[in-house]
Amino acid sequence: MNDMLPAPAVSDRDRFRIIIGVLIAMLLAALDQTIVGPAIPTIGAALGGTHYLSWIVSAYFLTATATTPLYGKIADIYGRRLTLFSAIAVFVLGSVICALSPAMVMLIIGRAVQGLGGGGLMALAQIVIADLVPPRERGKYAVYISATWAIASLAGPILGGLVTQYAHWSVIFWLNLPLAAFAVMMTSETLKRLPWQRRNHTLDMLGAGLVMLGTGCLLLALALGPQTENGWTSPLVLELIAAAVVLAGILAWHLLRTPSPLIPLDVLSNRVVLTATFSVFFAMAAFIGLTVYIPLFLQLVLGLDASQSGLALVGYMIGTVVGANFAGQTMARIPRYKRLPLAGLAVACGAMIWLGLRAPVLTLLETELVLIIAGIGSGMQFPITTVSVQNAVDPRDMGVATGVLAFLRSLGSSIGVAVVGAVGSGAGIAAGLAGGGAASPHTPGSAFTTVFFAASISLALAFAMLTLMPELPLRGRTASAPVAAEA
């Protein structure tokens, strides 16, 4: 391993400009995740196919999951700047497809294309920051990442609700075009100053394809399970589950044999990487699943319209940003930094249990307060797991480890939405949409009890995985690299 962390060959001023530039690109993908939530009920009512509402989100994360680990290697081969611009172009293409969609199937295809680019936007921002900033200082830069999510969390639900209420839901996708142009303008010159050493990697396209097919079979089984005549014992559902298991086995065999796998097993075998990434997997499953179903709860049960539910969702999103910002700022100052996210996840899990128990009688004020608390608690995990993973590996494996983290984060998001969607569909939430739409609350609050309980179970699993994560001292700019914690 290297004994010293290489100092970036850029000035502090250039470093700041580069980070701001890539964060603007990251904002493009972050905003698209938060702006869609309030529009989902209206989209379902307009395009039909309400049983597949979760696929509006799942399709995005499915393709982002399969391609995210590739982006680090693509950036090593072709450079950060070209890779970023390519990801933006693909993301914009998907946005246009979504905006012009006449039916749910076309919208889902457009979201899948968006995911092909969005996975790169999220991963490259973290990789570039890891290139420039040592782990001991990286927690401070969580402020900038938190600010990016704060803008997306505040503007996304509000814009999504207002546009859906007073214009047309397709406008939320057209808004990506000017933002993409602005991101290119801001990063075009600054990324030229980023030092880049070309590496010859082999892209594991077969591994990415197996991930996409296997995850797709699993997500489709989760979507069809509550809808078919025989439920989970339907031959089609059982065949899809069997196909997912077989593809998972083939993927494992492939990863063990290929010299440059999609998911490097030697990196994943590091105990910090293994436990932190799976903790993020379960936390994101709960987080993204809730961003889809909280607006449905607010509209179908509490009777809010699209714009009002967008405003109400802001509390949960801002709470997550506040928690992440606090943990990122505090991490470098306390030796037992893992206690922060553990306490936060425990509180968030308790908040979800509270919502589940109180779902039939919840008021808007009580819902908002509990969601803010849950957001603050769950948000504490994200910066600490990211820094811990990057701190635990040799600097030359930084991009690979970050890619693995982003991979399982996206996988957790896609599976989480599908699982919560299956739970919600089985409870009759989709039928509530068909029966009255967003403007008329026909669905009983008890239908969402299982949704909130499912989120609490996912957060409890995230807590359990994080308890197993070793706490390594954070490296500074001249500190030695840690000894790898082998599983």
Image (cartoon, helix red, strand yellow):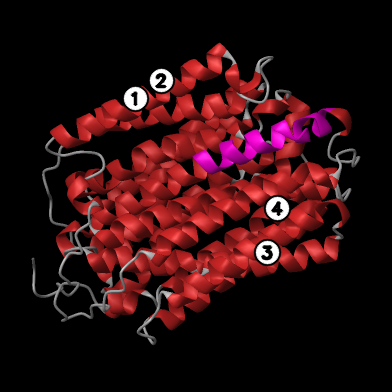
Residue at horizontal 34 percent and vertical 65 percent from the top: 469
Mark 3 or mark 1, earlier in chain: 1
Name the residue tied to disc 1. Answer: 247
How far is the residue under mark 3 from the one under mark 1?
A: 36 Å
The residue that disc 3 covers is 351
Q: Which residue is mark 4?
A: 159
Q: Quadrant of residue 410?
A: top left
Q: Secondary structure at mark 4?
A: helix
Q: Earlier in the sequence, mark 3 or mark 4?
A: 4
Q: Which mark is residue 243?
A: 2
- Looking at the picture, which amino acid does disc 4 mark? Leu
Q: Residue at x 19, y 59 (%)?
A: 486
The location of residue 277, given as percent across then percent down, is 37, 55
Quadrant for the C terminus, please. bottom left
Neighbor class of circle 1 (other Cα within 10 Å; few <14, some 14-19, many 20+) is some
Q: Earlier in the sequence, mark 4 or mark 2?
A: 4
Residue 414, compared with residue 342, is above or below; it is above
